[in-house]
Image: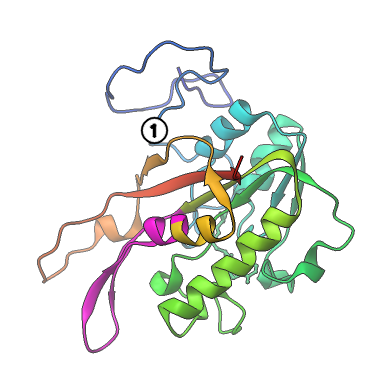
Amino acid sequence: MTTTTEDQPLRTIPLPIAPVNASPVPHLTSIHSVVERGPYGCSRYRGNCGGYLIRDLLGYFRPERVLDPMTGSGTCRDVCRELKIECTSFDLKQGQEAGDPASYAGAGRFDFVWLHPPYWRMIRYNDDPRCLSAAPTLDDFLKQLRDVLRCSRDVLSPGGVIAVLIGGFSDYDGRRRRYIPLPALTHQVAAELDLWPVCTEIIRLQHGNTSARRTYRGSFIPGLHDVCMVFGRNP
Ligand SMILES: C[S@@+](CC[C@H](N)C(=O)[O-])C[C@H]1O[C@@H](n2cnc3c(N)ncnc32)[C@H](O)[C@@H]1O
């Protein structure tokens, strides 16, 4: 059972029963649905995710050195601090760019990279043209995402993995509305870099989204999840 830091049971919805296996984190399956966000990062930081998925992934992959180059309010950094795992974290807001190899000079190798990029322009983080949320076109966004993934791949230790959390969204460019399937596109970009999934995708149910409290006039199928994909070098 998943528990908080105070060993309180977390609120989860019933899920299909998973097969018993030797996983060190048996409750970690292809669906992650924890209502609480935990004492990690800052819930007021737009687009922030809770810390329990990261905590479960770190429990499963057992890294010694973690990198979080798009740290935002520092959720991954805070989980690492609790678990006493060394973590290097930075963000464009502090001037370091995740897609520039120079940002990693002297940083060494990492067993686990946590990437939680902007979901393209769903939330605008700042006007710096290097920010993935400021990419003028989808192609530009995917090119920048490729640069970030390449840099992450190049600092992986042997057997290291990159976990990417991203979600699709419905985009309107003033002319047409279309759905942007960012998890599927991320798989394509990763494959071009010879990065291959090391396990199932994890569907993370988004509890407490800002948009859940709004009323919309139009008709659409609401998305209630994003997707975590874990990649390693193609064996
Ligand atoms: C979805 S938020 C991450 C939220 C984070 N997981 C947290 O705990 O708050 C995406 C972050 O990526 C950062 N970012 C965007 N483009 C970047 C780039 N090229 N290099 C580094 N950080 C970037 C943004 O500033 C933003 O903080």
Residue 2, visible in the rendered structure: yes
- Image position, residue 68 (x, y; %): 67, 53
Q: Quadrant of the C terminus?
A: top right
Q: Residue sitting at 42 percent across and 74 percent down?
A: 121
**In the image, is 117 to the left or to the right of 20?**
right
For mark 1, give the secondary structure: loop
Q: Assess whether residue 188 is covered by the magenta stretch.
A: no
Question: Which is more toward the observer, 36 or 33?
Answer: 33
Q: Residue sitting at 53 percent across and 61 percent down?
A: 192
Q: Which residue is mark 1?
A: 30
Q: Residues within 10 Å of mark 1 (few under 14, many from 20)?
A: some
Query: In the figure, residue 137 lies in which quadrant?
Result: bottom left
- Image position, residue 37 (x, y; %): 47, 41
Colour scheme employed for the rendering of this structure: rainbow
| Image vertical order of residue 157 relative to residue 178, above or below | above
Q: Hey, which residue is sitting farthest bottom in the picture?
A: 175
Q: Quadrant of the N terminus?
A: top left
Q: Residue sitting at 26 percent across and 57 percent down?
A: 213
- Image position, residue 109 (x, y; %): 81, 47
Question: Which is more toward the observer, 31 or 93?
Answer: 31
Three-letter code, disc 1: Ser
Q: Residue sitting at 77 percent across and 68 percent down?
A: 101
Ligand 1 location (quadrant): bottom right
Query: In the figure, residue 65 lies in which quadrant?
Result: top right
What residue span does the magenta drawing correspond to? 166-187
- Image position, residue 120 (x, y; %): 44, 71
